Image (tube, rainbow, N blue to C red):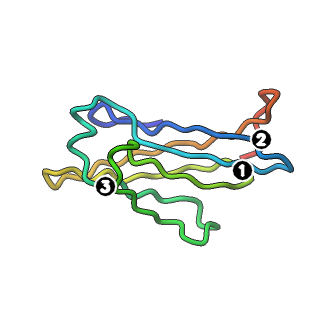
């Protein structure tokens, strides 16, 4: 996980069964830093039908939800009100209910 200006990517995940997960990622950090973000552009694994996705919703910390079968590296470009762009990355890790991590 990388960080910039105190911002990081966090994740949640839920095992749905049959080697399939629903998951979400969002930007975590100090409120004053999140308030300066206009939108986040996430780049997912190229096997997704739409691998580049833009989220503009500040109320849920620019959360992106999806589903799939394996972990991968997620990239995010965080666009700020001052015109600057910050780059983050996060290794999505998915776990079975017993705590065992699935393959990446």
Marks 1 and 2 close (CB-CB < 8 Å): yes
Residue at the right extreme?
18
Q: CA distance from mark 1 to mark 2?
A: 7 Å
Q: Which residue is labeled 2 in the image?
A: 102
Please give the name of the residue rendered at 61% of the width and 66% of the height, measured from the top-left corner. Answer: 48
Q: CA distance from mark 2 to mark 3?
A: 30 Å
Query: Above or below — where is 75 with respect to 8?
Result: below
Q: Is residue 1 left or right of residue 84?
A: right
Q: Alpha-carbon neighbours of circle 1 within 10 Å: few (<14), some, or many (≥20)? A: some
| Disc 2, SS | loop
Q: Position of residue 86 (x, y in %)?
A: 29, 48
Query: Which residue is under mark 3?
Result: 39
| Circles 1, 3 touching at the beta carbon (< 8 Å) | no
Counting from the top left corner in percent of width and height, residue 44 is at: 54, 59
Q: Residue at x 16, y 55 (%)?
A: 83
Mark earlier in primary sequence (1, 3): 3
Nearer the viewer's eye, disc 2 or disc 3?
3
Does dot 3 land on a helix, a strand or a loop? strand
Q: Residue furthest bottom?
A: 49
């Amino acid at each position: 996980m990388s960080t910039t200006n105190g911002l990081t990517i966090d994740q949640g995940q839920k095992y749905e069964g049959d080697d399939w997960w629903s998951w979400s990622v969002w930007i975590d950090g100090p409120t004053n830093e999140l308030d300066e973000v206009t939108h986040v552009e996430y780049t997912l694994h190229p096997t997704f039908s739409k691998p580049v996705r833009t989220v503009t919703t500040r109320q849920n910390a620019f959360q992106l939800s999806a589903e799939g079968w394996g972990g991968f590296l997620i990239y995010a470009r965080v666009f700020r009100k001052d015109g600057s762009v910050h780059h983050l990355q996060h290794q999505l890790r998915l776990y079975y209910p017993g705590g065992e991590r699935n393959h990446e």
